[in-house]
Every structure is written in C-alpha cells, then in structure tokens.
Amino acid sequence: DQDACFGRITFPYSLTNMSAFAALSAPIARAAAPAAGRASKQTARRAQSVRSKAVAEPETAAAGLAPRPDVRNVAIIAHVDHGKTTLVDSMLAQSKVFRENEKVETRVMDSNDLERERGITILSKNTAVTYKDTKVNIIDTPGHADFGGEVERVLNMVDGVLLLVDAIEGPMPQTRFVLKKALELEKKVVVVVNKIDREGARPDWVVDTTFDLFCSLGATDEQCEFPVVYASGFQGIAGLEPDDMSDTLEPLFDMIVNEVPEPVVNMTAPLQMLVTNLDYDEFKGRIALGRVNAGTISKAQNIKLGIPGSDSRNGKINELFVYKNFQKEVVEEVSAGDICAVAGLDDVMIGETIMADGAEPLPTITV
C-alpha cells in the first residue's frame, strides 16, 4: 500500500476503518463542538468501558484473576513547573488527610531539601487518598529529563497516568518522553489541563496540541480519544469544561475512579512483588517499594528474593507499610493490586522479586 499523508496522521489508501477518519478529524471537531458534545463523548466512552469490562470478566475469572474495585493506582506526570505538586497538595487537603490541628505544609511532595530549593521533584513520592470507598494510590514522578529513568520504573506500578499540561504552554518536551513510555505500556492516560485560572489560558489549543502529540507518538485510535478534565491546583477546583468548573476537585477524583482501570490480580496465587524503588529509613534501614502483583504479603513472612535465571535467597519481612495520608502506615498484610513498602531486606535491589516459596520471579525492569 502507498501511504497518504493528511495533517499529522499517515495511513494507507486501502484503510476502511472509519475510526481512523474520526481520529483524523478530531482536532476540527473539538474546536467546533459545543461543550455538551464533548461531555457526552466522555459519558459514552465510560459506558463502552463498562461493556468491555463485562465481556472481559469471564476470561479473567478463568485465569484466576479478579478486579479490585476498591483500588486505583495512578502516576502524575508533567513538565517542570506545570503545577503537579500543588495539585497533589490540594487533592490531599480536600481528602481531609490533614488534621485540623496539623500544619499544612505546602508542596508536601517536594520533601527533599534540594527539591524545595530548585522547585522540582526528583525522587518519586507516594501517597494515597480515599474517595468514596476507593483507595487512590498517587505516585508523583520526576518531570525533569535528567531523572527519566525513575519515571519509567514508576510506570510499572500503575494502571493509569494523569498527564498534566499547562493551560497556556501545553505539552512540553519531557511530557513527550514520558507520554511515549506510558502509551507503549498501554497505560490509560487522563489529560489534566492545569492552571486553568491563569490569564491567557487557551484550553482548546492545549487539548488540540496534546491530541497532535498523541498522534505523532503513534497512539491508537482509542488512546487518541483521551478523557480531559480541567483544573486549578492552586484554587483546588476542577471541571469537565473550562467554563463550567466545580468548587472542588471532585470532577478530577470522579475521572480517576471512572477512567483508570481497576487492578486485575490473582489474590490466591503465591506472593509476587516486583521491587520498583528503594527508600531508606534511619532506624529501619533499606526499604523496598513496589506493587504486590499476586497473592498477599504479610508482616514476619519468610520470603524468597531473586531475579529470573539466578538462584534466589531467603529473607524475612520485618515491617510492612502502606501509604495513607502521605505517611507510611504500619499494617499486618497487603493484598495484590496495592502498593506497599517493606523493611527487613537489607540487600534488596530494584528489579528483584519478593516471592513466596514456589513462585517464579517476575521479569526485571528494563530502563
């Protein structure tokens, strides 16, 4: 087939799939469509997602897999100074994670001294909020090119990404790098047009430019139909349309719960947990962070530690934590699909698998 180019999309003359034409014309449609039209598209997409989930459930059940409707794992990705940390601060505050008598420290995710001084996030930080009985694990990631490796590791822990773009500047170079990785890993991407309250904000242009970016990165038709929510992290407001904003971030929370897939896991299988990151505590020593891929991990559990193709070694879980209200909370056990931290494995390394006897190590992380 010969290739024909129109705009930013290349496709063969013989292509008859009308969805490709719909994706091609989406920038024009977005500019001309009324607000109600874009909102109805998001409603229709959620309905289709529900239908697809219903079809997939018998297959996953046959494989011993089951969704966890009470958990969502999401990473927030943005370029430097696009308001990521401020937005997370507002999400935490509105989820009542700060007690009334506790001082609310701004930019809570920039906890490292260097990060505060430079105003950027270098190491990923984990927190979790509860919204309508759903625990949302939120992983803040670096937005600077020098720390791209950590971004890729974080993507292995989540099922969806909040792609934060400035309402004036639109997507930037680091956004392009990270988005490409997220699309390759088939992570659900929710676009958050932030700083919508800025003078000179141009949300329609930003959404169209983001669409062009998706196309240039080889996104599928389905990926190009990304959901969009507008927000101001500074004011703590969000909405499905730039001229119809809620007084809170509830539309953003609803978008996460409705659009980010539930973890689909095997709760009864032997434990498997891929170590995605490391932390250090002055008293507890090295701490392994990751998502429980299968089974359940418990405090005082005897485990194996290793990588594919190598001999495993023995270990024991001394302490187990989950993330809640931006603090590590000690728990007795964590089930598959959730993100946790483990103490007691002094020689653990990124890419190793914490597993029960008889389980196989997971593939190591390629960065």
Image: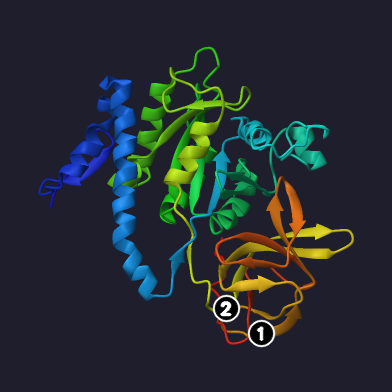
The crowding category of the residue bearing disc 1, from other C-alpha atoms within 10 Å (few below 14, some 14 to 19, many at least 20), is some
Which residue is farthest right?
A: 283
In this view of the protein, which residue sits in the foreground, 132 or 308?
132
Residue displayed at 31% across by 58% down: 54
Vertical arrangement, residue 246 with respect to residue 265, above or below: above
Location of residue 93 in the rendering, given as x and y in whole percent from the top left corner: 68, 33
Location of residue 229 in the rendering, given as x and y in whole percent from the top left corner: 45, 31
Instruction: Quadrant for residue 278, please give it.
Output: bottom right
Q: Amino acid at mark 2?
A: Pro
Q: Secondary structure at mark 1?
A: loop
Which residue is farthest top?
A: 199
Location of residue 271 in the rendering, given as x and y in whole percent from the top left corner: 59, 76
Q: Quadrant of the C terminus?
A: bottom right
Q: Which residue is mark 2?
A: 361
Q: Amino acid at mark 1?
A: Ser
Residue 306 is left or right of residue 152, and the answer is right
Location of residue 151 in the rendering, given as x and y in whole percent from the top left corner: 59, 51
Vertical arrangement, residue 308 with respect to residue 274, above or below: below
Q: Secondary structure at mark 2?
A: loop
Q: Which residue is mark 1?
A: 312
Residue 55 is left or right of residue 195, and the answer is left
